[in-house]
Image (tube, rainbow, N blue to C red):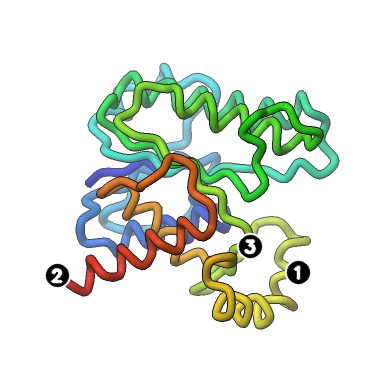
Amino acid sequence: MKVILFGATGMVGQGVLRECLLDAEIDGVLSLVRSASGTKHAKLREIIPPDFYDYSAIEDQLSGYDACFFTLGISSAGMNEAAYRRITYDLTLAAATTLARLNPAMTFIYVSGAGTDSTARGRSMWARVKGETENALLSLPFKAAYMFRPGLIVPRHGIRSKTRLYRIIYSFATPIFSVLEAALPKQVTDTEKLGRAMIDAARVGAPKHVLETSDIYELVKRDGASRRSI
């Protein structure tokens, strides 16, 4: 399986990239980044697109992929709706529409968030925009598309958030989060499990197109059982 990854330098993206590079059934990862990450691996190739809203200059390098893991995202804190939509909706759809045209047999997996508003008519600005983004992605002609809505995500294997405030919060709260993850596995996940669940969905599909944390937990169980049987 060959995959395209967006957002490899973010906390979730780092976790997904790690699992992709460790997975024997993934032959190659094309990572689209704003600047070189410094990560070196035989299976990894990085591209710095000249424009994340227009892929015409690099279209010849985006064909022949089986899955896309889209983990790019930004907090809505301090942003007005137009600015948040520009990054959350417009940027995501620019990539997705291009990939759907070039790779109609692709599975597209988008990391959204718990509380996303599928009606896109609620009072919460970020939830509306995320809901519109999910709905637009689900309407594209991919082989399959899955919207992942994790809630609390515990970073593993030395992975850190790029956001300073989040790093501070995680540095103090990770021990508590780990306890919560053990006690409430269907409500809390971590970067490793999220990456494994996304790979599993890309490989064999998922029972629904919108997956909450409890659904992600079930995919992780299925993935673990599948690997133990090999």
Whole-percent x, y for residue 113 in the image: 61, 48
| Camera sees residue 51 | no
Whole-percent x, y for residue 55 in the image: 44, 22
Secondary element type, mark 3: strand
List the residue tagged with mark 3: 152
List the residue tagged with mark 2: 230
What residue do we see at 53% from left, 72% from top?
Answer: 185
Whole-percent x, y for residue 127 in the image: 70, 38
> How far is mark 2 from mark 1, CA to CA?
39 Å
The residue carrying pointer 3 sits among few (fewer than 14), some (14 to 19) or many (20 or more) residues within 10 Å by Cα, namely: some
Assess whether mark 3 and mark 2 are in contact (beta carbons under 8 angstroms). Answer: no
What residue do we see at 51% from left, 60% from top?
Answer: 214
Q: Is residue 154 left or right of residue 3?
A: right
Please report whichever mark, 3 or 1, sits nearer to the chain's N-terminal start. 3
User: Mark 2 against mark 1, which lies toward the viewer?
Assistant: 2
Q: Nearer the viewer, residue 155 or 29?
A: 155
Q: Is residue 114 above or below residue 47?
A: below
Q: Is residue 136 left or right of residue 160?
A: left
User: Mark 3 against mark 1, which lies toward the viewer?
Assistant: 3
User: Which label was assigned to residue 145?
Assistant: none
Q: Nearer the viewer, residue 98 or 47?
A: 98
Q: Quadrant of the C terminus?
A: bottom left
Amino acid bearing label 2: Ile
What residue do we see at 27% from left, 61% from top?
Answer: 23
| Camera sees residue 64 | yes
List the residue tagged with mark 1: 169
Quarter of the image where one finds residue 131 = top right
The residue carrying pointer 1 sits among few (fewer than 14), some (14 to 19) or many (20 or more) residues within 10 Å by Cα, namely: few
> How far is mark 2 from mark 3, CA to CA?
31 Å
